[in-house]
Image (cartoon, rainbow, N blue to C red):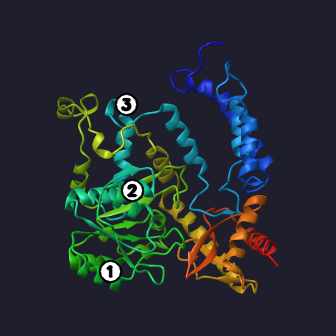
Amino acid sequence: MGMPPLASGPHGADALRPLLDTVLDALRAGTAARGGPLPAGGPGAVAARVADAAGAILPERGDPEALRVLVTALAEGAADPAHPLCAAHLHTPPLAVAAAADLAASVLNPSLDSWDQAPAASALETLVTRALARETGAADAVVTTGGTESNQLAVLLARERHGAGLRLVHGAGAHHSLPRAAWLLGLPEPVVVPAPAGTLDPAALDDALTQVPGPHLVAATAGTTDAGLIDPLPEIADRCAAHGARLHVDAAYGAGLLFSERHRARLAGLEAADTVALDLHKLGWQPIPAGLLTVTDADDLGALHHRADYLNADDDTDAGLPDLLGRSPRTSRRPDVLKTAVTLKTLGRAGLGALVDAVCSLAREFADLVETHPGFELHAPPTISTVLFRPAGAGDDAVAAVRRALLTTGRAVLGRARADGRLWLKATLLNPHTRPDDLAALLTLVEGHVPR
């Protein structure tokens, strides 16, 4: 066996072309074998099928069929976000153009920890981060792996600006990564503000900021994980300004509304935040990962400055080579910005806005179906594209059993959320190709699995 070919270089494209045919054929075969949004049989059955396909992971001699076999197995055992009945999580089907761009990023394999590893990628990242920062009214942005890293980084920057006594103040419905960031960074126990209607209560926030010694970092949410709710950002910003508190907005889900002329106004007040988390592998239809953190004061990023002589020696920086280590706490970073840049330029604001409008409309249609069906109860009209519903008269155990039955059969993928003290099924509609009859089929499937 000769030396295996490389993906890049003068002969990389020739080596890749037949392999891509293999991958595409395997994806098609695996998807057909699955036959639905999720593999049937539950965790044990899926693990057994994967183990059977994989065989010895590190054999003595290589297997030229490994690519076909393992991609087929992965596709057959995947949760397919492109299937209209896969609607559990904030897990979007990636755009084809974004996936194609991601292939180019993998082939070229630049690492954004020094300019000499990523000359064009670093320049492109600067253009994209500044353009997206402007969308939130900010001065700059850094690329992250998603909402969790963005939230952790926002807490870190706040701590570096205000000291180790910083108190994180967040609503009861905030993402779990925020209190976890306080724990990771050794900050005092966060202050949890009531959210009786699912969103942070400004009056309760005012009380907390009055009673709890500062400095404070208030974390608001634009698109909660459970119900897609948006905190009252203008009122929260006013309370923060009155108390001198720093404001972070976790808009990992909701930031995509910025692309929509119809829905952009729902994010009024976002521009008052010191930092904002964006996540374009949600309402941006990017392959994971595709996160950003925007900063209103670019000087905040000075806290990330770090020196490693082999990557950003002083004399190289003085000579004009860009210093990339201050753009992330991570060292090796792939050029995830390429797929985002290609998507933004290919679709434009109007194209992305149309996708956002489509999924928001789907959520309203599904909510209407639920509300008019005598066998179901709707929690509330959707704010973005998440709908909470449950079989009428069913207890929490029955709601949980319906969801698990659908998962085990592989017929549909729904999430779960607790609201108003009860368990609800959660449909997160993020596939713009979903049709009205798909929504009706989903409701029929759920109805057929309700214990009698």
Q: Which residue matches tag 3?
A: 117
Query: Residue under circle 1?
Result: 205
Residue 93 is left or right of residue 312, and the answer is right
Q: How crowded is mark 1: few (under 14 residues within 10 Å), some or many (20 or more)?
A: many
Q: Please name the residue shown 71% across and 34% down the image.
A: 54
Mark number, residue 77 = none
Q: Distance between the residues labelled 3 and 1?
A: 46 Å
Looking at the rendered structure, the kind of residue marked 1 is Leu
Q: Earlier in the sequence, mark 2 or mark 1?
A: 2
Residue situated in front as seen by the camera: 184 or 359: 184
Label 2 close to label 1 by CB (< 8 Å): no
Pick whichever, 179 or 2, lies toward us.
Answer: 179
Q: Residue at x 54, y 71 (%)?
A: 226
Q: Specify the quadrant that holds the N terminus.
A: top right
**N-terminal-most mark, 3 or 2:** 3
Residue 51: which quarter of the image?
Answer: top right
Question: Is residue 133 visible to us here?
Answer: no
Q: Residue at x 56, y 24 (%)?
A: 12
Q: Which residue lies furthest to the top in this view?
A: 2
Quarter of the image for the C terminus: give it. bottom right
Please state which amino acid type lies under the numbered disc 2: Ser
Q: Is residue 281 above or below residue 381?
A: above
Contact (Cβ within 8 Å) of mark 3 with mark 1: no
Helix, strand or loop at mark 1 = helix
Comes first in the chain, label 3 or label 1: 3
Q: Can residue 131 be seen in this view?
A: yes
Report x, y in % for residue 450.
Answer: 78, 75
